[in-house]
Amino acid sequence: MFYNLHSTARTFTNLGIELPKACTQALELAEAITEATTTTAAAELNNGITDGSITPANVVKKLREAAQAMLIAERLPQAAQATESALTAAFNAGIRDNADNLIDQLSEPFNTAAATVTTAGRHFQPEANAATVLAAGVEAAAAWQDLTEARSTLSQIRNARAIIADLERDNTHPALFYTAGPLTAQDVWNVQSNWGGAGDFFHHLTHEGYSLNLNTSAEAKAIEEAAQATAEEQAATAAATARTKREADPHSEPALRKALIDASRAGTV
């Protein structure tokens, strides 16, 4: 019971992240509900007989209490299960309402792991073998030694970040959650094309020269929007330059057309 709730919580707590109060309250309530469903009246009755607290004088009363508790216990799991959606909603709201704070906390382990992967990416390809790494020097060898742990940490953070994005209903491309800006439109396409490909995404990214950063939803959107705005501005500038160049060329179609119109108006044609 409450497996998804506890699984989501572990995704964050295993990284040393402090969950929001709304989340811890939901977990505490879930634990209390679970404990209530595991208490058995029969066990308490038998313990009373064993320790002598149940006597001929009170046995009927104890039996009635146990019978009533057993009837309730039959329905308790069903009642407890009915609370799961409400507790999950409360827990998820805690994550969603504190998304930026959680990302800020995640940034600490992210930056540590990203530093190792960045060093590795700058020195060797993701598929490099030990001989290639050793030939790349001491820095490369040190990064290689810590690379498995760093990749594991980044994978856990990626899961946590995906949970946050899902609860925020954020449709930003996931690759932009981990890439430092500013980026050009071509850069955006490059990092997005690496997402979901073979090999380690973060290593590929750093090997191509990009820098890693754990972005909030607003930061990721800003990077993408800035890249698009710059691309549109450059396209407009290029179009204006080309138009000016064409108009200045006396042999261009617009210039010839204009010359014919001017001549026609002057009565020379």
Image (spheres, rainbow, N blue to C red):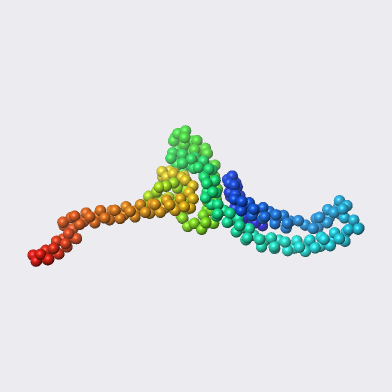
Point out the residue furthest to the left here: 268
* Residue 156 appears in view: yes
Q: In this view of the protein, which residue sits in the foreground, 237 or 12? A: 237
The quarter of the image holding the N terminus is bottom right
Give the number of marks: 0
Q: Position of residue 211 (x, y in %)?
A: 44, 44
Q: Residue at x 16, y 57 (%)?
A: 251
Locate residue 260 relative to residue 231 in the image: left or right.
left
Q: Position of residue 222 (x, y in %)?
A: 43, 52
Q: In this view of the protein, which residue sits in the foreground, 24 or 2? A: 24
* Residue 129 appears in view: no
Point out the residue furthest to the top here: 138
Q: Residue at x 37, y 54 (%)?
A: 229
Q: In this view of the protein, which residue sits in the foreground, 4 or 140? A: 4
Where, by quadrant of the figure, is residue 84 drawn?
A: bottom right
Q: Residue at x 48, y 35 (%)?
A: 141
Q: Residue at x 58, y 56 (%)?
A: 93
Point out the residue furthest to the right here: 56
The quarter of the image holding the C terminus is bottom left
Q: In this view of the protein, which residue sits in the foreground, 160 or 61? A: 61
Q: Position of residue 82 (x, y in %)?
A: 66, 62
Vertical side of 126 occupied by 33: above or below: below
